[in-house]
């Protein structure tokens, strides 16, 4: 019986602490647009910015052969609980191998997905969920990996 009382007291004292810890884990994490801007600048990417209908900043990244956009999703105001990179490219509508090429890409590439937009374009996308937590180094790697995948994707699309 003597052991039971200290354990009960410990449980009673620890319960609010554990509940607070669990609440902190469940709280959605967000990143402000300014931090995303800094990450893109640190990576020496040239960008232009615009606001969408929700007043969230989206970043257009300059490349030679594609339009790359970083979109923010979730979060309050100009913050994001997830981000998406999307490259928009023209596609040859007469290319009979277009869908097999996209399927081949999606079958072997782990993080990006490719598809047609229904209007003669091809999209390459990659999402990053930030809601559970993140660090800026992971976001930099996400952007770098996408930008590195883009020329590989373009080369695959140009192949016969």
Image (tube, rainbow, N blue to C red):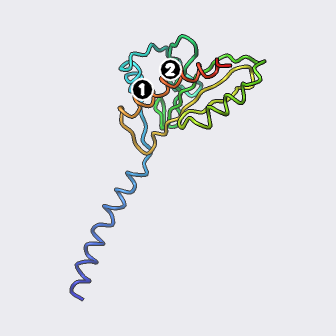
Point out the tag, 2 or 1, that comes first from the N-terminus. Answer: 1
Seen from the viewer's position, the closer of residues 36 and 89 is: 89
Please, is residue 132 above or below residue 56 in the view? below
> Measuring 42% from the left and 48% from the top, which residue is drawn there?
27
Q: Quadrant of residue 38?
A: top left
The total of numbered circles placed on residues is: 2
Local SS, label 2: strand
Position of residue 111 in the picture relative to residue 20 (left or right): right
Local SS, label 1: helix
Position of residue 59 in the picture relative to residue 107 (left or right): left
Seen from the viewer's position, the closer of residues 103 and 70 is: 103
Position of residue 32 in the picture relative to residue 112 (left or right): left
Quadrant of the image containing the C terminus: top right
- Name, please, the residue furthest toward the bottom: 1
Q: CA distance from mark 2 to mark 1?
A: 9 Å
Badge number at residue 36: 1
Q: Quadrant of residue 37?
A: top left
Quadrant of the image containing the N terminus: bottom left
Please, is residue 116 above or below residue 50 in the view? below
Question: Looking at the image, do the residues carrying marks 2 and 1 touch, with CB atoms under 8 Å apart?
Answer: yes
- Name, please, the residue furthest toward the top: 64
Residue 95: x and y in percent read 75, 20
> Measuring 52% from the left and 13% from the top, which residue is drawn there?
63
> Measuring 24% from the left and 82% from the top, which residue is drawn there?
5
> Measuring 28% from the left and 78% from the top, which residue is drawn there?
8
Residue 18: x and y in percent read 33, 61
Position of residue 91 in the picture relative to residue 127 (left or right): right
Residue 159: x and y in percent read 64, 19
Residue 89: x and y in percent read 63, 18
Residue named by callout 2: 59
Label 1 crowd (10 A; few <14 / some 14-19 / many >=20): many
């Amino acid at each position: 019986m003597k052991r039971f009382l200290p354990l009960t007291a410990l449980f009673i004292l620890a319960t609010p602490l554990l509940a607070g810890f669990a609440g902190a884990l469940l709280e959605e994490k967000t990143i402000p647009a300014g931090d995303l801007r800094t990450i893109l600048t640190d990576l020496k990417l040239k960008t232009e910015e615009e606001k969408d209908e929700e007043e969230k900043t989206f970043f257009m990244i300059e490349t030679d052969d594609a339009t790359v956009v970083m979109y923010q999703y979730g979060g309050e105001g100009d913050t994001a609980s997830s981000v998406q990179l999307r490259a928009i490219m023209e596609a040859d509508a007469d290319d009979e191998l277009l869908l097999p090429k996209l399927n081949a890409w999606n079958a072997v590439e782990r993080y990006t997905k490719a598809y047609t937009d229904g209007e003669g374009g091809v999209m390459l996308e990659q999402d990053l969920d930030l809601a559970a937590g993140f660090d800026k180094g992971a976001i930099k790697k996400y952007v770098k990996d996408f930008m590195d995948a883009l020329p590989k994707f373009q080369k695959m699309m140009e192949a016969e």
